[in-house]
Amino acid sequence: MTAEHVILARRVRLRGAVQGVGFRPYVYQQAVKFGISGWVENTTQGVSLQAQGAAEAVDQFLVALRAAPAPAQIAEMLVEETEPSGAVGFVIRASAEEGARLAQILPDLALCEDCLRELFDPADRRYLYPFINCTRCGPRYSIVEDVPYDRARTSMRHFPMCEACRAEYENPFDRRFHAEPNACPKCGPSVALWDGQGALLSRRHEAILGAAEAIRAGKIVAVKGIGGFHLVADARNAEAVALLRARKRRPEKPFAVMFPSFAQLERACVVDETERALLESPARPIVLVRRKSSEIAANVAPGNPWLGAFLPYAPLHHLLLHELDFPVVATSGNLSDEPIVIDETEALTRLAPIADLFLVHDRPIVRPLDDSVMRVAAGRELMLRRARGFAPEPIAIANIPPAILALGGHMKTTVALTLDGAVLQSQHIGDMETVEARAAHERAVADLTGLRATAPRLVAHDLHPDYATTRLAARTGLPSFAVQHHVAHIAAAMAENAVAPPLLGVAWDGTGYGLDGTIWGGEFLRLGAHGAERVAHLRTFRLPGGEAAAREPRRSALALLYEAFGKTDDAWLYFTEPERVTIAHMLRNNINAPETSSMGRLFDGFAALCGLRQVASYEGQAAAEFEWAADGFEARAAYEFPLRDGVLDWQPALEALLEDRRRGAAAGEISAAFHAGLAKAIAAVAREIGEKRVVLTGGCFQNKRLLESAIAELRLAGHEAIWHRRAPPNDGAIALGQAVWAGWHAGDEPCA
Ligand code: ZN
Ligand code: ZN
Ligand code: FE
């Protein structure tokens, strides 16, 4: 063998997003291009391959691998020398047996650029076809019925491929090689337009044109998308939006708006580079961006300086929005806070009171996936609702034992399952208040355990004895492990940031069952190697009416005044006389007035005392409005929150608020001083406790101003701030936290 014909062989192991994204065909094409022989296969870890050929060719091949096009993403590439074999040619091997059930199931991906071009190319055989996709885009998790991921185990099994589609599917040089949802107008799903009773009005492109015409005329159309139905209305038409609000029984909670293009989105909102990257990412989440004055109707997001904006992701959205050429409200197809509707028969009953028309299709949606919601805070992404485009991506966690099932909390529920060295989280399910939500929760559990063929050996759940999820844990008959709510919040943030104890966890939210049986929510917990210890908390007060207080910020306000001064009356608050008498009675006699250290309720109380909100129409409204009020206000002062014997006292801040109100200060000025004071208080507690690392978590840290000022104060004082990114700070991450905390500590004590 002469020098120029030295044959090298290399074994390569790749990790990252390398499965279900057309990576193996890409490897195959590059191997053919450079004359490489060997094989490639999916493994439990990612992709493994062997490449042999002339030295220079192998080098070029490896360079090409690193440059694999999106959505493939190489996180790690290990190259080892190995012995050349006699193999000729290059083959894509069937997935390794034991790997089949462990291989990562991908989230749904937005339509790619190539498919978008074909969609609007009159010469293409998929011109205007709403189910066009390829290996780089299209539905994934929303159509998977079982694993391994191939067409026969997706809801595309109802559509046998035509000859042309099959030829693409079987050709390793084609963009649609093993694109499992591959389809065309001849063989694939199709759309139809129904009236409110389900009678067929039109089919195919006519149906899309008909839906567009109705939306233009101010009607509400239920549109079946990727993870469920949207309710769609003209976002410029205040009357149409008001009609949608009335029918959906959602008086004020902001609606998300889908824009036909980024250019149109940018005309209505201020968008920075990070926000743009999120908006255009394959996950296509709703991103909260700053509103400008625009044609968007004010009642889309009343009084809100932010707008939940997003871009079309399904080809059907592209076709509809292209036809309309104006932004539309696209909100989850449900009534109030029920889970999203995914099935057209179900839509006809549950959405009939809301929608005038139904734009449906015959590709079944296997599981509901709401749109994910994110914002940019402290210069990076922050998840607020994790569903389509992200579920069921696992989070890698070193040394986590497998087969722990976590059932989540009560609000914004998700479920989670540990694997060997990772945690799998379900999509957002919703509040466990309705029969529909509890059924969706049950299906999510079956999904996670079924798709991974994992029989749970331990169930993690909340400490609250009355949560539906806690009772469900008992019914499984498995050993169970209760995780305190705020410990779960902190554990979730630790897990996704890969940090270990010791650290100080700041967990601030509306409500969570405490270790002492009271309602916690303004917590400072020190986490050490052996567990969690409550080192400080917000001064407690009594909430007249318990949970009812969350819907009536004025009750929290009165509770603060009563606790501080024994007052049961205040000129700033609005109560009818009978209401005031009842609530005063509850406070004085301690009837149905549970004690709480809730930071969420403190925000509510301050918002009410500023005259911003007496009664809320959706969760977190008063706190959000209090945050928005501070827009444009520099914090000239910071309210004092002194720490005494582990109790963070709000009374000096309350007195300052009342004084500021008396001298006629704006709500925004008060809010700015309140936020600044809390941020300083966090740094002061961190100094007192003496932990370098501080985790910021809980629903209160969805508040951009609070999060950013707390990070700044902590850094100023030499602390390291740790906060969320891909797992929400709110209760959407409780299941994740329960799973990892149980994984770390279930062995510490006998299971309950
Ligand atoms: Zn594509
Ligand atoms: Zn076809
Ligand atoms: Fe919480």
Image (cartoon, grey):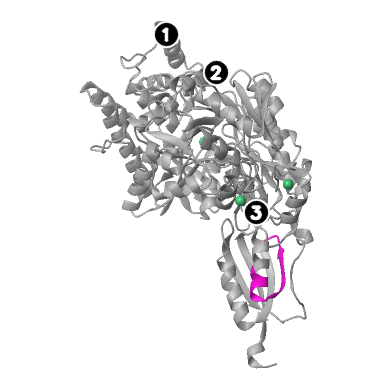
Q: For the view shown, which residue lies furthest in the front direction?
A: 123
Q: Secondary structure at mark 1?
A: helix
Label 3 crowd (10 A; few <14 / some 14-19 / many >=20)? many
Q: Nearer the viewer, mark 3 or mark 1?
A: 3
How many angstroms separate mark 3 from mark 1 (CA)? 65 Å
Q: Nearer the viewer, mark 2 or mark 3?
A: 3
Q: Secondary structure at mark 3?
A: loop
Residue at the top extreme of this rendering: 578
Residue in front for this viewpoint, 293 or 701: 293
Is 116 situated above or below 522? below
Q: Nearer the viewer, residue 466 or 455?
A: 455
Numbered circle sitting on residue 581: 1
Q: Earlier in the sequence, mark 1 or mark 2?
A: 2
Give the amino acid at mark 2: Arg
Q: CA distance from mark 1 to mark 2?
A: 35 Å
Residue 688 is marked as: none
Residue 415 % position (x, y): 64, 40
**Residue to which mark 3 is pinned:** 135
Mark 2 Cα-neighbour bin, 10 Å: few <14, some 14–19, many ≥20: some
Please indicate, yes or no, whether residue 371 appears anywhere in the rendered image.
Answer: no
